[in-house]
Amino acid sequence: MVLFSIEILRGCYMLDGREKIAMLMFSDADSTRYEVPIPLPKMNLQDQAAKDPIYSVEVNMDPFSLVVKRKSTDTVILDISHGGFIFEDQLLQISSSVPSKYLYGLGEHEHESLLHQNWNWHRWGMFSRDEFPGPNRNLYGVHPMYLNIEDDAANSHAILLLNSNAMEAVLTPMPGITWRTIGGVLDFYVFLGSTPSEAVSQYINAIGLPYFPPYWALGFQLCRWGYNSLDRVKQVVDDMRNADIPQDIQYGDIDYMSDQLDFTWNKTSYAGLPEFVQDLHQHGQHYIIILDPAIGASQPAGSYPPYEDGKAKDIFIRHGDGRPMLGKVWPPGNAAFPDYTNTTTHTWWQNHIVDFHRNVSFDGLWIDMNEPANFVQGSVEGCTNNQYNNPPYKPGKHGKIILL
């Protein structure tokens, strides 16, 4: 079955200069559809064929099919000729065989093992959310990528679906995989390896390497919520020193804040925090504070500069009619959510971090509640009744989210 309500579907494939990566995209040729606005930093793909790729691509139009093979072994890496290809406005589905059941990845979930073992039409929903782990539940991160070991020689490839809409991956007995998402485009990157480490390396280098941490960040760290006072934190640090237990880093959870507001500290229960951090530094130790992206929006006018400044700079997410979209997180009352795709937000965030650092010379930031988390569905007004909040198909996902 092939179903297109988008009348003209555009498909293309491109190969990169290293001959080991293919890009396969299916989108709407007549209308603009949402694509992940962050480019892959190391791809630099050109719309031209590679000179000597290690794979072949076969395309047939009637009936429509596309097959990617590894040339050296003739192994089928991707084959969408098995049917079930759907490209509607709010439901995109594509199915492919996979060479073997030695498949890893697809996160973030609670897995019984790194190797996927349930191929009986098992659904893995993907959409970041802030709730405790549970069987088959999507968790904090989204990684629509898998690694497949194809044969006994350990030839391997990885495939990434670059799409940030709610989605699911279904593992089928063939063995195969069915991708379903409720928006955007089908933008696949195929990393041909050929060893497992080479395939993963190609993937990591394409999406960008993680930030290289300072050496001290690899040391012994101590963190918990509920110290409730600086005196208790001091006691813990002193006890560690007296017992000769190594400790490189002490954390501060939201109980160091005043009313759980970013860029504040409680002048009563955490009086002397700047001096405590200096003492840590004198002992060769470090201090990391928690910051939550949601900003308190119910404080008296003029009393909370981060919100007032953000409101003046128009950085907070709004409803379609322009009103601020308010939710509930840790601050008392309501919370506003900065739009981190807005470059003005980057400057606002950085400036308030720098200002707070002038008072408390912390060494690192722990960014929490960044899914983004929200304690109510949609906003304090509920979810707007529109087609986006009520899609015709709902992927297998769990959690409370901000909806537009």
Image (spheres, helix red, strand yellow):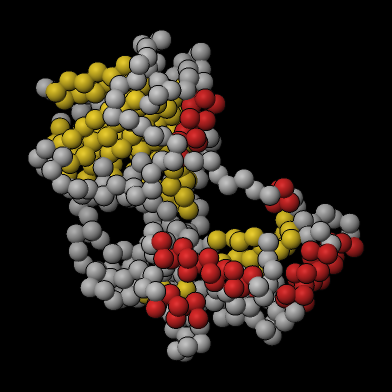
| Corner quadrant of residue 120 | top left
Q: Is residue 344 visible?
A: yes
Identity of the residue drawn at 20% across and 24% down: 65
Whether residue 120 can be seen here: no
364 up-or-down from 319: above or below: above
Q: Which residue is located at x 41 percent, y 10 percent?
A: 72
Q: How many marks?
A: 0
User: Residue 221's x, y, as percent?
Assistant: 72, 56
- Horizontal side of 182 relative to 158 (left or right) equals left
- Say if 229 sits above or below 363 in the image: below
Q: Give 165 or 57, whichever is nearer the viewer.
A: 57
Residue 288 percent coordinates (x, y):
67, 62
Left or right side of 11 for 310? right
Q: Quadrant of the N terminus?
A: top left
Residue drawn 20% across and 52% down? 392
- Residue 270, x across and y down, in percent: 70, 79
Q: Residue furthest left?
A: 7
Residue 316 sits above or below residue 400 on the image: below
Taking 356 as reference, is 120 above or below it? above
Q: Is residue 125 left or right of residue 252?
A: left
Q: Quadrant of residue 85?
A: top left
Left or right: 167 in relation to 244: left
Q: Nearer the viewer, residue 395 or 349?
A: 349
Frontmost residue, 214 versus 120: 214
